[in-house]
């Protein structure tokens, strides 16, 4: 009778064991990639919303301090406020954007500050313009701005008193 040495009978892993481990690792990797992509997409929209809120606060701050633009050939007579205009882009072309400019009694003055959203972020409906008034920092009527990306949407509300939430 032939004796099998116990030390030599078990030297490594069988092919089946290696395939099971590899398939479990592949499943875990694919799940983690799916969650990472979902997280990344939500962060793109969250970042666009945060940037818009900050720039609305910038326009509000410049209006409340009465900061007149200084780069125009024709100076601003009397600052009425800062105007935020929303521009719808073209699908497959220019992205949605918004612009901030001083509104004076003698027209729009100063450099136009234009901010672009990432191509995947869109206005659900293009909001009408917002003018933050001097000193008060408020606006004529409440505005709701809704941004969407990857089948998710977020809303920003600017109240009459100028609160941005």
Image (cartoon, rainbow, N blue to C red):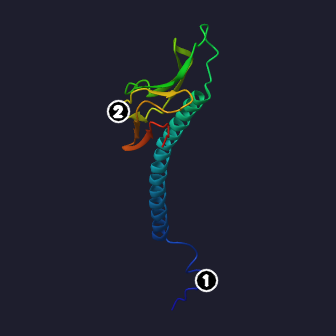
In the picture as drawn, the residue positioned furthest to the top comes out as: 73
Q: Position of residue 89 (x, y in %)?
A: 40, 25
User: Dot 2 surroundings within 10 Å: few (below 14), some, or many (20 or more)?
Assistant: few
Compared with residue 143, is residue 38 higher up or lower down, i.e. above or below?
A: below
Residue at x-position 55% and y-position 35%: 57
Between residues 49 and 75, which one lies in front from this camera angle? 75
Give the label on residue 74, or none.
Answer: none
Mark 1, Cα crowd under 10 Å, few <14 / some 14-19 / many 20+, is few
Q: Are marks 1 and 2 in contact (CB under 8 Å)?
A: no
> Marks 1 and 2, Cα distance to the nearest angstrom?
74 Å
Closer-to-camera residue (145/109): 109
On the image, the x and y values in percent for residue 53 come to 52, 38
Tell me which corner region of the image, top left, top right, bottom left or bottom right, holds residue 144. top left
Helix, strand or loop status at disc 1? loop
Which element is circle 2 on? loop
Towards the viewer: 136 or 56 = 136
User: Extreme right residue here?
Assistant: 70
Badge number at residue 7: 1
Q: Is residue 20 above or below residue 1?
A: above
Q: Position of residue 117 (x, y in %)?
A: 48, 32
- Residue found 50% across the figure and 36% down from its top: 162
Asked which quadrant contains residue 86, the reply is top left
Q: Where residue 121 appears, x then y in whole percent?
A: 43, 36
Q: Earlier in the sequence, mark 1 or mark 2?
A: 1
Marker count (numbered)? 2
Q: Is residue 44 above or below residue 111?
A: below
- Residue 84 or 152: which is nearer the viewer? 84
> Mark 1, mark 2: which one is toward the viewer?
2
Q: Name the residue carrying label 2.
A: 125
């Amino acid at each position: 009778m032939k004796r099998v040495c116990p030390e030599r009978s078990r030297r490594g892993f069988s092919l089946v064991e290696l395939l099971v481990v590899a398939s479990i690792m592949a499943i875990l990797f694919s799940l983690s990639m799916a969650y990472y992509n979902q997280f990344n997409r939500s962060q793109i929209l969250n970042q666009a919303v945060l940037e818009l809120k900050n720039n609305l606060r910038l326009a509000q701050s410049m209006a409340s301090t009465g900061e007149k633009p200084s780069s125009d050939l024709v100076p601003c007579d009397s600052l009425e406020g800062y105007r935020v205009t929303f521009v719808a882009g073209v699908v497959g072309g220019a992205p949605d954007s918004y612009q901030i400019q001083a509104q004076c009694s003698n027209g729009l003055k100063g450099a136009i500050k234009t901010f672009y959203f990432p191509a995947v972020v869109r206005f659900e409906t293009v909001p009408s313009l917002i003018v933050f008034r001097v000193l008060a920092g408020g606006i004529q009527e409440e505005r709701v701005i809704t941004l969407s990306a990857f089948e998710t949407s977020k809303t920003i509300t600017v109240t009459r008193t100028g609160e941005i939430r």
